[in-house]
Each structure stands twice: as C-alpha cells, then as structure tokens.
Image: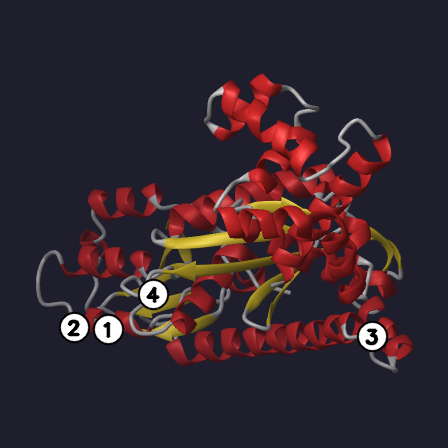
Amino acid sequence: MALTLNEILVTSKSKYRLTQLCGENGLNNVVSWVYISEDISTASFLKGGELIITTGVSCRTPTWLYDFTKTVIEQGTCGLILNIGTYIKEEDITEDLISLCEAHSFPLFTMPWETHIYDITRDYYNRILIDSQTDTVITNAFLSVIRNTEALAQVVEVLEQYNYTVTGSYSACVVNYTADASFLTPSSEELHPKIQALMKRFVKRNHLNCHIILYKNDFLLIFHDEELSSLTKYMEQLLDALSSAFEGVNFHIGIGSMVDDLTKLSTSYQRGMAALSMSHFHDKQLYRYDDMGFLKILLSANDKELLTNYMNDHLKKIMDYDAIHNTEYLETLHNYLLHNGSIQLIAGAMFCHRNTVNYRIHVIKDVLDFDLDSTDVRFNLMVSFAIKEYLEVLA
C-alpha cells in the first residue's frame, strides 16, 4: 500500500480550502509523512516523500520562498502547502517559483491562514498511520508466504482481504544497490527511504499491482497479475529511473519466474535471488531467471558436492594443467564449445591469432586427450562449464 497526494486530496482539498497552483503530474507522489518546516537548514532531516507545510515565518529575504522550495524538491519531498495570509503573500508566489515546480512536476498548494494547521496535520497523520498499518499487515503476510510458515492458510486469508487472490500470477523481483563510500554520508541506511519512495511513485504512476518490501537489506517487489514481458519492460524503466535519480549508486535487479499460485511465491523469490546473483556475476544490471537456461536445473540441485565432483571429473585435468603451466586452455576449450569449433570466432572472442588457437586445440585434443568429436564428451563438458559458473555464482 502507498498513499498518494491525489488520494488524500479527494476528500480534503475543499475541506481545508487547498488551491493547487501547479505540479499536476506529481499528484501520484507517495506521501510518507506531513512535515511542518520553516527553516531550510532542517532539510537534511527529510527522508523523502514528506508533504511540507510552511507559514513562511522565517522568511527574511525576497528569494527565501524560492530557495526553500528548491531545497525541499531536491530532498525528494512530495509536495508543498503554503499557508498564506500573514507571512507569505499571494504576490510572493512568483512565475519563477511556478516554473520551478512545473519543471520538477512538484505539486504546490496554497492554504488560507484561517485553516488550522493542527486540523489538517492531524487528519493527514491519521490517514498515513492507517495506510502504514495496512502496509505492515500485507508485508508480514507476504513474508510469511515467502518463509513458508506453518500458518500459511491463515496468512493467505489475510492477503485475500486485500485482493491478493490465491490463484493468479505472481512474480518476485529483487532490487539491491551498492554505492561508493564517498557518496554515502554517513550511512547507506539513509538511502533506503529515498529509494523506496521513488519506487512507490513509479508503481503508482504506472498503475502496477505491486507491493514493495525492504527485506534483508534488499527491496522485494511482489507483482500480481502482470505479464512477464510487461514486467521486464517496467523493471528496465525503473532501473533507468533509479540510476538517474541516484548518481553514484549501482543498482541490480533479479526478476523471478511467474508462478500461478500465491502459495508458490517463495519459489519465485528464490529464483529472483538467483537471477540477482547472476546479474552481479555477469555485471549486468538486470537479469531474468527465465534467461538462466541450464542453470535453472542446477538451481534445483541441493547437493553441491555432487555438482563439484561432476565438474572435476571433466574439467579438473585441464584446470590443473593451466595452473601448472600458466596457460589458458580451459578458456579456449570453453570458447571452442560455445563457437562450435570455429577457429575464427574463437580467435576473435579471445583476441588472439588463429595459429595460437589451432595450437591450443591441438594440445587439448592430443596432449590432454579430449575427444572433441564425441557428442557425449561435448555435452558433458558444457554441463561441467555450466556447473562451474553456477558454483562461482554461489561463492
């Protein structure tokens, strides 16, 4: 759940005599809290998503209101209400201020001095708290499903109350990030609410049936009844939005498989985590479980010792040879299999001369005794390379 400005304004705009001046495109901004601020110096306390109310009591210069608005926009707040009549006058709201807000799709409102700030803040606080409590109930229920708790039937009943039906498609996407130490001041914990606020805005603006959870220091996005092709498109767009908004932060997304039952959500989550690991391993920002190919079969194997032994049966001989002679025969063999024995393609992939490739293939075949003409041998080798990659992802 996430409460937007638009949802709050439906029943309160006329009640508190709010007039929207600009920022229509920002009405789907998510409201995390209501914050009364009169001092720009307190902006560092903002986490993102706050609806700001100011009377302008601290206004001392002609540019104060513009500078104040610019600062709260930069802090990722969702909107600004100007309590006009005493300290802020109608003429203080300049065209430059309107242009600034429009450029950032930032909703700007006026509220007459006669409206009691206590009334509007109490009203909005109550709505936000109720929405937060609902969000917590849904979050705990989804986490119970992912953890396969014994009380799964009761948990499913709870989720059904919020229109998460047992049948229907579900998919779990996992988002995590890393950042340079110089970018974080002082802690990465400060980024969590700002990132979550952006993701909630994205979900609302695209009308997605998605619940967002901060779980084990990752963001878990649970989608209900979204096509995988559309889901991939939206995740690519979200990745672009995150990368643009948080310069210096590297994001990775793992997209789990679609499951056809709410009770199977834990499977999608585990596959999303596997896809996330692959995204890091291959240095790709986004990776889908469905693109893992043969590795999907390996993921279901719990006996890692068995997999290691299988790999060693077929590759240890050439790995040991490389270690002793400081050669690259293992990589050459892998490229030989990937490029179906094409010397030209292997040379291009490894940035070396064709004669070098020919010599290495000769050693692999005649010295190391690999029968590369055998279909069974090539199959076992490809499986072994897949296992090697899988074990490196797990490492």
Q: Callout 1, which amino acid?
A: Glu
Q: How crowded is mark 3: few (under 14 residues within 10 Å), some or many (20 or more)?
A: some
Q: Which mark is residue 148?
A: 3
Q: In percent of the image, x 73 and y 36: which residue is there? A: 370
Which tag, 3 or 1, sits closer to the chain's start?
1
Q: Residue furthest left?
A: 61
Judged from the image, the secondary structure of the residue bearing numbered disc 4 is: strand
Which tag, 3 or 4, sits closer to the chain's start?
4
Q: Where is residue 74 in the image (x, y as percent from the top left)?
A: 30, 57
| Front residue of this view, candidates 160 and 337 | 337
Q: Position of residue 348 (x, y in %)?
A: 51, 22
Q: Residues within 10 Å of mark 4 (few under 14, many from 20)?
A: some
Q: Which mark is residue 112?
A: 4
Mark 2 and 1 residues: CB-CB less than 8 Å, in contact? yes
Judged from the image, the secondary structure of the residue bearing numbered disc 1 is: loop
Tell which tag, 1 or 4, sits nearer the viewer: 1
Could you give the CA–CA distance between mark 4 and mark 2, rounded to whole angstroms? Answer: 18 Å
Q: Callout 4, which amino acid?
A: Pro
Could you give the CA–CA distance between mark 2 and mark 1, rounded to whole angstroms? Answer: 6 Å
Tell which tag, 2 or 3, sits nearer the viewer: 3
Judged from the image, the secondary structure of the residue bearing numbered disc 3 is: loop
Q: Is residue 191 visible?
A: yes
Q: Which mark is residue 38?
A: 1
Tell which tag, 3 or 1, sits nearer the viewer: 3
Residue 171 appears left or right of 281? right
Q: Which residue was labeled with disc 2?
A: 58
Which tag, 1 or 4, sits closer to the chain's start?
1
Could you give the CA–CA distance between mark 3 and mark 1, rounded to whole angstroms? Answer: 48 Å
| Front residue of this view, candidates 90 and 322 | 322
Could you give the CA–CA distance between mark 2 and mark 3, rounded to whole angstroms? Answer: 54 Å
Q: Position of residue 135 (x, y in %)?
A: 65, 72
